[in-house]
Image: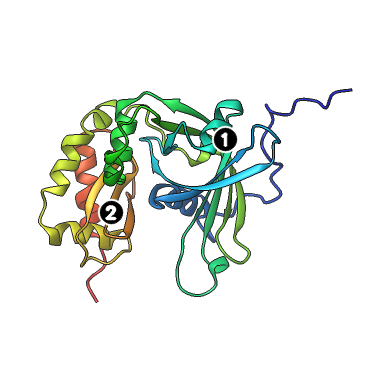
Amino acid sequence: MNAPDDSSKIPFAPPFAPLPQNTFDGLGLAKKLLRSIPAAALATLTRETSFPFATLTSMATDGDGAPLLLLSDLAHHTRNLRADPRGSLLLARGGKGDPLAHPRLTVVGRLAPSADARAKARFLRRHPKSALYAGFADFSIWRLEPEAAHLNGGFARAADYPGADLLTRVDGAATLLAEEDSLLAEVNALPRRARGELARAAGEAASLNWRATGLDPEGLDLVAPQMTARLVFSQRAENPAAWREALEEARRSAPAPD
């Protein structure tokens, strides 16, 4: 008798309940990791044997937070995905000391090619050097639809979440997303000091030369050489005017320089 097909079920049975928000914002951390980490380990299922196959890939996020990858058809992982779209990403924040003391996030779901020009633009803003080969015929953008996620935020800070909980609602934000290019241009036209204040509001060093790469109703993505930052707004902003106000509020609320 053939084994039952479990491909439609949740990828894993969550052993860890979501963390109480009054003690630790686990979901907030998970979403920040998703938006801010620029590279991830991609695991696919080898098409010949179904053994797990892990590689390293650059990553960006779509407007709703879904992971975006730029993959070549010549790569093993892409061939695996064309045979079986199931995969997972491990996003780990590095740092000094024990690597296991730093937060990491596993996202499980199905991947498919995306022909959305806006998604490709978001990826290339995050990884501009990829423009050297992104136009080659064998390269395409792939989007992962999250089905489940596991956060390890440190000791006693593990939690599981439905994939949908990781995503940002973009309903009602069509005008904002349509003006993403012009709004990012406004941010990047600010003096370096002002962009540094936005990074400081996101918890990063203000002295670096930051630039904005993506926006959504919940915040702003920033990059600097060898660094990334995620600025999270205190409340949603679904249109350009509200988004500008939320950005200025975040800048004003930045902690004072040391």
User: Which residue is denoted by mark 2 in the rendering?
Assistant: 223
Which is nearer the eye, 216 or 5? 5
Quadrant for the C terminus in the image: bottom left
Q: Judge by depth and name the residue closer to the eye, 50 or 241.
A: 50
Mark yes or no: residue 216 visible.
no
Residue 66's image quarter?
top left
Above or below — where is 93 with respect to 96?
above
Alpha-carbon span between mark 1 and mark 2: 26 Å
Q: Are marks 1 and 2 in contact (CB under 8 Å)?
A: no
Position of 139 with respect to 191 (left or right) is right
Q: Looking at the picture, which amino acid does disc 2 mark?
A: Val
Task: Estimate the x, y position of residue 75 in percent, counting from the top left.
Answer: 49, 37
- Crowding around mark 2 (Cα neighbors within 10 Å: few <14, some 14 to 19, many 20+) is many
Amino acid type, residue under disc 1 in the picture: Gly
> In the rendered structure, which disc, 1 or 2, sits on the residue that comes first in sequence?
1
Q: Is residue 214 visible?
A: yes
In the picture shown, does residue 68 fall above or below 232?
Answer: above
Question: Residue drawn at (71%, 42%), measured in percent from left and top?
Answer: 13
**Quadrant placement of the N terminus:** top right
User: What residue is shown at x 37% (from left), y 23% (from top)?
Assistant: 115
Image-based side of 156 in relation to 139, left or right: right
Q: x, y percentage for residue 257?
A: 22, 72
Q: Is mark 1 on a helix, strand or loop?
A: strand
Tell me where residue 171 sits by quadrant.
Answer: top left
The circle drawn on residue 109 is 1
Q: Residue at the location (83% across, 27% down)?
A: 3
Q: Is residue 218 left or right of residue 83?
A: left
Q: Residue placed farthest to the front in the image?
A: 74
